[in-house]
Image (tube, grey):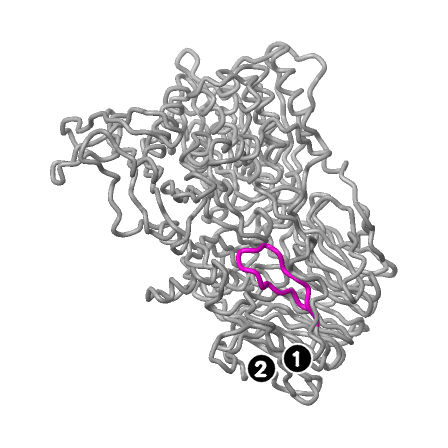
Amino acid sequence: MSKSRRRARISGGAALLGAAALLASGVPAAQAADETPQGPATEVVPGTGTKTPALVDGIEEAAKDSGSPAAAARGHLAAKKDRYEIADPARNLTAEQTLKQGDDETVRFQQKHRGLPVLGGQYLVRMEKKDGDRVVTGTSGKYFTGLTVGTRAHVAEKTAVERAVAATGAGDGRSGSLTKLSPRPDRTRAGAKAKARTEGGRKPELTGASHGLVVLPRGKGVLTYHVTVTGTDPVSGAPVKQEVYVDAASGFPVLQYSGIQSIADDADFPGTTGSGVKLDGKKVDLDLTHDAASDAYQLRDHRRQWDGSKNALTTWDARGVDANDASGRWPSGIGEVASKTKEFGKDATESGAVDAHWAAGQVYDYYKKKHGRDSLDGKGMAINSLVGVTDGGFPFVNAFWDGQKMVYGGGDEETKTLSADLDVVGHEMTHGVVEHTAGLVYVGQSGALNEAVADYFGNAIDVTASKTPMSDPKAALIGEDLCRTKAPEDCAFRNLNDGRTTAKDFLGVTIGTDSGGVHLNSTIFSGALWDIREDLGGTLADRIVYKALAEYLTPLDGYTDARNAVVAAAKALGVKGAKLRSVNRAFDAHGITKGWEKAIGADSDKLLGDVNATRLGGGLPNTGAGAGGGWWATSKSDDEGQEAFSVWAGRTDGKGTKKLISPNDGRYHVYPDTDGRTVAWVAYGPTSVEVLSRPLTGGPVKKLWSAGTTVANVHVSGQTVTWQESSPHGQQRVAYLRKGEREPVFVDGGRYDVATALPTLSGDKLGYAKVYVDKDGHQQVSTEITDVRTGKHTLVPAKGAYLGIATPAINGTYLYWLVDDIADDNRMGLRRANLDGTGLTDVIPESSATAYFWNVDASDSAVTLTQWRPQRGWSNGNLTKLVQTDLDGKGLKRVSCNRGEQTGHAADTGKRVVWIDGTTGRTDLVTRARPAGTC
């Protein structure tokens, strides 16, 4: 969910599934002993949900095979089958990478299940040569021994791609990106960008590309298609690169997350040296190449890689290129930043080209000189930096690594281009190193580790180059040099020395927020690494962390796994005694200890646990919750996350026994709602998407409608069920079906060109958002109320020119909705109308200091909203929290003081609300009968 038009932030990470998006991976941390044992001691840390150990350390066992490192490593695993439980290493392990440093060798294997890759299944074997013979010194990683899923897909690959694209365009149902409907064009920056693209002859669209079948390691395994969706967000106009995993049995997108990571021959050596001025005013040397054809000097550095791959570090002029066209693709028409002389002037400075080129060289030198690593992939890959990209013609105040290159916006009046701070460049380029080593997936704890490692090395590169002592108060800041007017401490994205701990500061959030908390929770771990660097010094600490990254960590690791990896890497480097105790003490101080999740409390009552999360830590879409008449309904998989989702229902007061409503037929049953008598929901199958219903008292499941596209926002009240359908390009239409009718009624005849979306239902009154053309021919957006008995439509005229409206909610008296009237303002006011369309009232004006709202729902006596606070970067302050008022907007109070994200709420009767809460590190369905008040 994108809750604000944030000015800038570092983002990034290797794009895959998060092992622990909302929870710890479950592998216990090694307990720090009071006294560090001297000499070799075998340590075996068991895996969770697998028979293969997560870590084996302190061994010295001869490798049986004297051939290649991969063959020797496989031979060891085969010879020790009783320890590792890997039945056939030759068949089920593919060597992805072999890292050699002196006498040390580390082989990283990718797990295969019946020939298909297993997402996050990687196992490492570490060896060293002694007297010419190989000796295995340790192993670690994740190998999933319980996989038995078949490899035959029941969904056509084309269908999987279509559903991935539709899901990306429509969001994830109740709390996805499409909770707001805007006219096109509008007066927002996003609207102007969309207009600029359309008038430029290119319709905003999304396209998908399949990478084939992949097994998700949930329970016995889930067979999926991996689809990458790219293009332009149909709502915001922002660039999209979404990784989507579509269940190959049902066609439901079971996992999706962003893949944009924000933040030759024997010829003579062609290089030369020039200079330029960075944005901080310092003159620096630049490695250049003279181009004879244009008689100009280019920011193309061949010197650093001339003796190896002969690739180059090149900086490209991408001014005028849209960020979307630079994400995951190479934009046409760009050229190297060039100058007629060796002295690059003001233009190269202001575009950020000088900073980007100089900084890329600094990062390359750090990894080469300190760790012997040749470029980001360790094999001399070219490093390309694009500077000056825009956001639909507006300033792009961000930077990202897209797996191929660095992309920098040009900044604005307040923020310099993000290439202007070395720790930011180091951070983003380190994402490339992570991608080619541990591959830490960019969701939840594994994503937070990705961010933490990127912050750690970005900071290490910066303080090393600037010779800043660790004792300097600004040494731990990331991005502190980017602001043109603010002080460093006010400008920084993060502070590695902020003292955050799991017990006090871990923020449980859903997958739609910050990819499960990758930035929110990163300094818990990077803070521990910072403490280690303070205690041991930069040289040793950097070696330890790099060794852990390259030789121990695997894609699905969480905090406790990473602690084990760092401690084991330290031991391997000969760290012991007081120094090893200081490593363990750093993790203890930040609460990265066994069972840390259990220390987090909540003031709400749990109705159903682990709703949208699994042992793998979530990554699943928010499949919604509904409430009414004293009952709740939601969707949940089994405890392993292997089975397709089923719909469950129960009483909101927690009494009685929960009921399984949907059949367990292999389809994904999602987006349920209930009015206390009937449950309605959506079932995703291989060839169709069906709207279903069933009485709470039991009886057969009834098929209401079969659609060929994405369906969400289901509501039921009395005799009527309503829902929203989405085209593959994110266009919306609303339908409803009354009891006894065979065919649904589509509002406005089901036309996608007259957008209707976000339905809400109470009795015979259906409310929804609508884009329409007013009497002057202008496109407007407002709400409309339809009497489903008579078919009468009542348009609530727009009060001025709305920029957009969000999540209408209806009760027996009023229709409420959120409205955005003020351009480039982060607030949305609460507006209501009578059910006959009269009485238009600003219940809470958009100008109100409290009007940072996102979603709304209403009961007979209360209105409940999700509220957030705009803050730079990610913090607890801008997580959504539930607040409640009376029907007139009076007496605004917090529903719950839980510190995690509160989302996906549904109003029951009176003041009782159910919602999906991430506080405990899992997404639980919880409730409160009344507001908590002031927190």
- The C terminus sits in image quarter: top right
Question: Is disc 1 placed on a helix, strand or loop?
Answer: strand
> Considering depth in this image, is 408 or 82 the residue closer to the camera?
408
Circle 2: residue type = Phe
Q: From where the camera sits, is residue 935 visible?
A: yes
Kind of element beneath mark 2 = strand
Residue 204 appears left or right of 474: left
Kind of residue sitting beneath label 1? Ile
Q: Is residue 165 left or right of residue 264?
A: right
Query: Any mark on residue 55, and which?
Result: none
Where is the N terminus found, in terms of image quarters?
Answer: bottom right
Q: Nearer the viewer, mark 1 or mark 2?
A: 1
Does the rendering let one see residue 55?
Answer: no
Q: Which residue is mark 1?
A: 785
> Which range of residues does the magenta coloring cover?
816-832
Q: Position of residue 491 (x, y in %)?
A: 53, 35
Q: Badge 2 is on which residue? A: 746
State the image coordinates of residue 200 (x, y, percent, origin top left).
33, 64
* Crowd rating for badge 1 (residues with CA inside 10 Å; few <14, some 14–19, many 20+): many
